[in-house]
Image: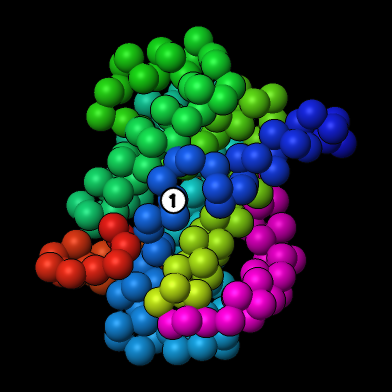
Amino acid sequence: MPLTSSRRAALLLLADGRFPAGAHAHSGGAEAAVRAGRIQGPATLAAFCEGRLHTTGLVAAALAAAACAGCDPYALDAAADARTPAPALRDTARKLGRQLLRAARATWPSPELDAVATARPRGLHQPVVLGLTARAAGLAPRDAAQTAAYESCGGPATAAVRLLSLDPFDATAVLAGLADAMDAVAERATAAADAVRATGDTGRLPAASAPLLDITAQQHAAWPVRLFAS
């Protein structure tokens, strides 16, 4: 379904890095990768973002699409927990979920968002809240998946500019080069969300893993000095 002008504006607002949901304080694993030498410039940043997109990005996009489609957010949150083995990443996902929910309730007031805030004061995983936010904004599951896919690459790319003094033009070119891959991931995620909606089985969600991201997230959380929260 084509986006109306008001829905297109809502999608742009939700995907904007300036949306006050706290994501700017997180590197998506890029800070640990830079310290380990795995990200050194545009080429290695592109490889890192592509790997993240097809693993944690795919999972996040499917969760967001399913939440936007009206699937049970608490069942989705449990599925997100099962797909997030690192305690540091679970804590980060819930913190970002709380921050996004606060911004969403102020931007697109919704009884559904209010109910979630009351039922789960510790927060739901960020992708689940992202899907609920997209739903409150009148967006479609495909839009929610697209936003999550973009976030999975946009966060590390933005962080790399600060961590490496990378030319912002180069970081933007990395994201542009991944545009087709982001679209493909969003399509896969939406199809998985449709399967969950049809069956009620959250086991139909992707469970792609990135063990090195899990390991380095735990290590990063113990660093006494760091630029990013995660």
The boundaries of the magenta stretch are 164-192
Choose between 24 and 95: the one closer to the eye.
24
Whether residue 44 appears in magenta in the rendering, the answer is no
Q: Which residue occupies 71% across, 58% down?
A: 183
Compared with residue 148, is residue 225 higher up or lower down, i.e. above or below? below
Q: Which quarter of the rendered picture does the C terminus lie within?
A: bottom left
Compared with residue 30, is residue 66 higher up or lower down, i.e. above or below? above
The amino acid sitting under disc 1 is Ala
Compared across the picture, whether 120 is left or right of 71 comes to left
Q: Residue furthest top?
A: 111
Q: State the image coordinates of residue 33 (x, y, percent, origin top left).
A: 35, 78
Whether residue 166 appears in magenta in the rendering, the answer is yes
Residue 43 image-quadrant placement: bottom right
- Residue at numbered disc 1: 23
Q: Which residue occupies 58% across, 81% down?
A: 167
Choose between 60 and 107: the one closer to the eye.
107
Q: Which residue occupies 71% across, 65% down?
A: 179
